[in-house]
Image: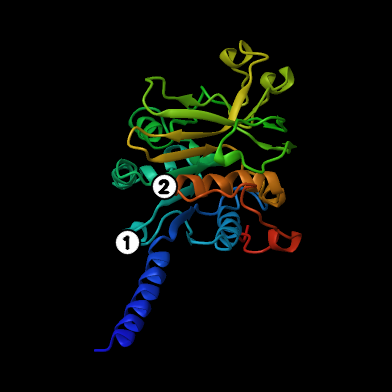
Amino acid sequence: MRNSTRNAILAVALILNSLGSGYAANKKILLIAGKPSHGPGDHEFRAGSLLLQNCLNKVQNVEAEVHDFGWPKDDSAFDGIDAVLIYADGGGGHPAIQKNRAKLIDGLANKGIGIGCAHYGVEVPKGDPGKYMQNWIGGYYEHAFSVNPMWAPDFKTFPKHPITRGVKPFKIVDEWYFNMRFRNDNIGKITPLLVATPSDKVRNGPYVWPKGPYKHILSNKGRTETMMWSYIRENGGRGFGFTGGHKHTNWGNDNFRKAVLNGLLWIAKSKVPKNGVESTVKIKELKENLDPK
C-alpha cells in the first residue's frame, strides 16, 4: 500500500473517531414529569418539562428526553444518563419512593449521576425517604417543618457558581417553599443559590397548606431563606433543589428558566456557558402541551 493511500485511510479514521467521540461526549438528561394535578396552569409538569427539553436540546452536546405521567415505563430509560430531573408531585406519593425506585435512584447517585428535584418534587416524608433525598440533593421539604407560602422573593444577589451564570435579579410570585431540612452532618457541600428574606407577613401566613403559622418560622423573622441550592456529594456527584415551579407561566421568565437550565447542565457535568443557557420561550409556547383539567 502506498504511503499516500495509507495516510488518506488514517485521516478518514481519525475524522470518524473524532465524530464518534463527539457523539459519545453528549450529555443525556432525563426529565421525569409527574402526573396531572391541581388546576389549569398549575403543576403543569409535562408542559414545563417539554419546554425545558426544547431549550436543552438547542445546547451543543446535550440531549434531553421527557418521560411523563410520573415515571418511565421501563427502567432502561435510565441507561447512560448523566442527570435526571424529577418535576412531579411529592409527599407520600413522590414517584421516586414508590416500589423499589428509591434504591434505583440511590444507585444512580452513588455512581455520580446528577439528580435535580423541582417544586413539589423536593418533598418526601421524613425518615428513610428524607435520608435518601438528603443523599441525592442535600436537603428536602419536610412536612410541618418547611413551609409553602405563595409569595414573590426578591432575588437580588447571587453567589459565584456555574448555576447562577447570566442570572439577573428577578422577583416573581410562586409557591416558593423555604426552611428545607438540609443535612447537617458535614457530608457533601450545599451552596444556597436563590436566596431572599421573607417579610413578616409571609412568615405569618397563611401558607398554602397547612395554613400555619409555625412558631419556628415566626422565630426566624429577618432571616434569609434558600429557594434553590446546589449539592456536591462526597463522590463528586451533583444535585440541586428548586422550590419554584407551581405556576407554569413562570417558565416564561428568562431568569427563572435560566437558573434551572444552568442547574441541569451543571448536575450533568456539562459546561455551563459564560452567560448561562440562552433560551427564549414565547407566550404561545406556554399554552402548548397543557394537561386537560
Examine the rendering and report whether any part of residue 132 can be seen: yes
Task: Say which quadrant the C terminus sits in.
Answer: bottom right
The numbered mark at residue 123 is none
Examine the rendering and report whether any part of residue 99 can be seen: no
Task: Say which quadrant the N terminus sits in.
Answer: bottom left
Q: Residue at x 48, y 35 (%)?
A: 123
Taking the image as shown, residue 19 lies to the left or right of residue 195, namely left
Q: Residue at x 61, y 24 (%)?
A: 225
In the rendered structure, which amino acid carries the disc numbered 1? Ser
The image position of residue 92, as x and y in percent, is: 42, 38
* Residue farthest top in this picture: 219
Q: Is 222 in front, or is 269?
A: 269
Taking the image as shown, residue 166 lies to the left or right of residue 103, namely right
Residue under label 2: 95
Query: In the rendered image of this protein, does residue 186 appear above or below residue 277?
Result: above
The image position of residue 251, as x and y in percent, is: 67, 50
- The alpha-carbon separation of the residues under discs 1 and 2 comes to 17 Å
Q: Nearer the viewer, mark 1 or mark 2?
A: 1
Query: In the rendered image of this protein, does residue 123 appear above or below residue 254?
Result: above
The image position of residue 145, as x and y in percent, is: 51, 22
Query: In the rendered image of this protein, does residue 107 appear above or below residue 198?
Result: below
Q: Is 9 in front, or is 193?
A: 9
Element on which disc 1 rests: helix
- Pointer 1 or 2: first along the chain: 1
Residue under label 1: 76
Element on which disc 2 rests: helix
